[in-house]
Image (cartoon, rainbow, N blue to C red):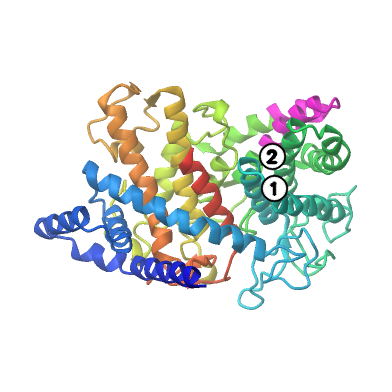
Amino acid sequence: MASVEVRSHRRRKLYKAVGVMATVLFLVQSALLIFHLIVVLLTMRSFPFLIAVGAALLQGGLVTSSPLVNAVGDAVDSFLALESPIALQGILDNIGGGGKNVAGAIAGLVVASPSKTNPDYFYTWTRDSALTFKALVDTFIANYSSSLQQEIENYVTAQARLQTVSSPSGSLASGGLAEPKFNVDGTAFTGPWGRPQRDGPALRATALIAYARWLMGNGYKSTAQSIVWPVVSNDLSYVTQYWNQTGFDLWEEVDGSSFFTLAVQHRALVEGSALAEALGTSCSNCVSQAPQVLCFLQSFWDSSRGYIISNINENNGRSGEDANSLLGSIHTFDPAAGCDASTYQPCSDRALANHKVVVDSFRSIYSINAGVRPGTAAAVGRYPEDSYQGGNPWFLNTLAAAELLYDALYTWNKQGSITVTSTSLSFFKDFDSSITVGTYSASSPVYTSLTTAIRTYADGFVAICAKHAANNGSLAEQFSRDNGFELSANDLTWSYASVLTAAAARAN
């Protein structure tokens, strides 16, 4: 009991300390004060103080020296070491069949949040559930756990059943797989909603494909074939039939063609075709349709403005700058694809240019981002014109900004070079004003300085989330654009899943 109390006390100290980061940011304006802070950071070994001041320096763009970079990196390491198990437990608490926050939910169903009023998120969304279980499957693959495998098996069973539930979107045979959400007892939600949402089947297929590959690699091919593949096959059939039709985006607001939806559909078709072949079956429509989806994906890139237009074939009056595009890149990350621009891989020139535009779009509109210059981390919302719940930053989007950069760093390190193009030049100039178009090998000083600066930049996004998390580590959907306090749905499952995926990307 004493050790639990000590850990709890340390955690409270950490999250309380993180709360002073914004104040410190505004205090460290003069060179003399910066000097004194550096001295303190290098001589005091207090972790709570380190992450508080270090994150403030990160957000202010004041961390440039190697000792400080290392110190702040260590602080983010320690924060993620504390937060990751909290996030995992937060997810499990929101899964039916045992989750303490979701009484009445059937086993294997992921509840978006325990919140039942303002907003009411006490439902299971196909998209949120699939993204959550993809994170759990990856966690399971990295570190086997029989209890986690049971959760995954419950998910497979629950999704097989949900596929047969007729809803306002239709039946299994008539488009029903695009129904966005269900009641937590597994029955259809029949109220008005933004329907259809066509990303769910693709995301569910991708999560289950990852588990099927693990099964095959560990001698359970028959299970993958008889239990998992039928669910995946249904979802792939849906994608091949409906990918070229419009639907609502992941924010459930825009009825058109969504970058995120098309990107994850392409991934599902490519991986589904490979799984089918490995299982000795086929998905001929996957093979024929995937190149067409990839071709259509190019329509989202606006070369004149230098970013991804996240929704097309609609007329909502927005700029198109949207975290939809950041999420699309990280959830289609393929380490074997290098920096391929056509699939918007995280280290591609398109993804990096887009990252800058999207993040920069929030710098001037949130009070908590005041004074934060380009090339330093900022709180990230959904899109600049957002007004939902006041239009605030989201934990999952701020973490997505970090994860994309971690993925890029992984690929650069793997291939041993960074290529700067005219498209990505503006992104790299935030870290080296004299950078020019060209390829920089891992042995060059430019490569070292760029990767160091970009990793520090990525850590800054994590530090912002540390700063605004609750004292006990719980994460809501949003935090206030004005004062940083948590807002909207409490204990958002997707927020917790984002911690796991960002931490995993950082560790690669």
Relative placement, left or right, of 282 versus 273 is: right
Question: Quick one: SS at disc 2?
Answer: helix
Mark 2–mark 1 Cα distance, whole angstroms, equals 7 Å
Using the image, determine if residue 390 lies above or below residue 243.
below
Residue at x 41%, y 61% (from the top left corner): 466
Crowd rating for badge 2 (residues with CA inside 10 Å; few <14, some 14–19, many 20+): many
Q: Which residue is mark 1?
A: 199
Identity, as a three-letter code, of the amino acid under mark 2? Gln
In which quarter of the view is residue 237 placed?
Answer: top right
Closer to the camera in the image, 113 or 348: 113
* x and y, in percent, of residue 349 in the image: 44, 32
Identity, as a three-letter code, of the amino acid under mark 1? Asp
Using the image, determine if residue 408 lies above or below residue 4.
above
Residue ranking furthest to the front: 2
* x and y, in percent, of residue 40 in the image: 18, 58
In which quarter of the view is residue 202 placed?
Answer: top right
Question: Magenta segment: does it hold 91?
Answer: no
Q: Which residue is mark 2?
A: 265
* x and y, in percent, of residue 132 in the image: 65, 53
Question: Magenta segment: does it hold 268?
Answer: yes
Of the image marks 2 and 1, the number of the one nearer the N terminus: 1
Closer to the camera in the image, 216 or 426: 216
Relative placement, left or right, of 407 versus 70 is: right
Relative placement, left or right, of 258 versus 388 is: right
Q: Cβ–Cβ below 8 Å for labels 2 and 1?
A: yes
